[in-house]
Image (cartoon, helix red, strand yellow):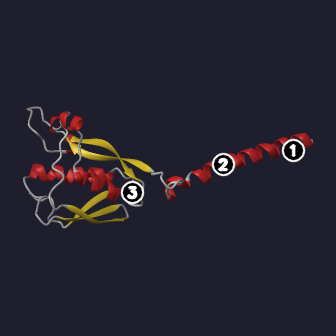
């Protein structure tokens, strides 16, 4: 009987140790790197546009979300991943291979910057600076600019709806 009790206690100690190791190691991604020179990153999707994916039966460009293409990028782990992803999208950085594959973007837009973000009950409000009125234009163009930001933001599960400030942004 004592041998069975000993084995049962041994199994409990081993299981508890294994669980403790998992719990202790998990916060590394939450609180920061274990070592001074280590950088923790996360993968996000930035949504760009490919007009070849956005054509109707007659070959006309539809200017819809169908042309959005998610491209994965790495960002440094932070408390503001939504803001970091949007800021990276606004830089408009595409590789030569991505451009050769038909992916485009009108970002960066001179003077356009993300001023702030707030998330309240699933509604993400993005406040932008656009001193040169670069977010205006034709309905096709402004729709795609809007869709790129909205899709990039909505990849985060806590975002259900996206609103823009000022409301004059992305007006044809």
Q: Is residue 41 left or right of residue 90?
A: right
Q: Sequence order check: which comes first, mark 2 or mark 3?
A: 2
Q: Sequence order check: which comes first, mark 3 or mark 1?
A: 1
Closer-to-camera residue (154/18): 18
What percent of the width, then of the height, locates residue 10?
80, 44
What percent of the width, then of the height, locates residue 43?
39, 46
Residue drawn 61% across the image and 48% down it: 22
State the separation of the CA atoms marked 1 and 2.
21 Å
What percent of the width, then of the height, locates residue 99?
19, 38
Residue drawn 11% across the image and 59% down it: 134
What percent of the width, then of the height, locates residue 100?
18, 34
Name the residue carrying label 1: 5
Is the residue marked by circle 2 packed among few (<14), some (14-19), or many (20+) residues within 10 Å? few
Res 165 quadrant in image: bottom left
- Please name which of the two marks, 1 or 2, marks the residue nearer to the observer: 2
Closer-to-camera residue (31/51): 31
The outermost residue toward the front is: 37
Let me know if residue 160 appears in the view.
no
Res 27 quadrant in image: bottom right
Q: Quadrant of the N terminus?
A: top right
Name the residue carrying label 3: 158
Name the residue carrying label 2: 19
Q: Which mark is residue 60?
A: none
Q: Sequence order check: which comes first, mark 1 or mark 2?
A: 1
């Amino acid at each position: 009987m004592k041998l069975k009790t000993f084995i049962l206690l041994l199994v409990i100690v081993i299981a508890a140790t294994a669980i403790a190791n998992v719990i202790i190691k998990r916060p590394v991604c939450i609180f920061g790197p274990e070592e001074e020179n280590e950088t923790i990153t996360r993968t996000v999707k930035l949504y760009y546009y490919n007009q070849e994916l956005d054509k109707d039966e007659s070959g006309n460009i539809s200017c819809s979300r169908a042309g959005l293409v998610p491209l994965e990028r790495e960002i440094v782990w932070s408390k503001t991943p939504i803001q970091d992803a949007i800021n990276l999208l606004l830089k408009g950085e595409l590789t030569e291979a991505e451009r050769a594959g038909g992916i485009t973007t009108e970002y960066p837009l001179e003077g356009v910057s993300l001023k702030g973000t707030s998330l309240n009950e699933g509604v993400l409000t993005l406040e932008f600076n656009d001193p040169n009125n670069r977010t205006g234009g034709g309905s096709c163009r402004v729709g795609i600019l809007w869709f790129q930001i909205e899709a990039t933001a909505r990849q985060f599960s806590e975002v259900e709806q996206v609103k823009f400030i000022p409301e004059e942004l992305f007006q044809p």
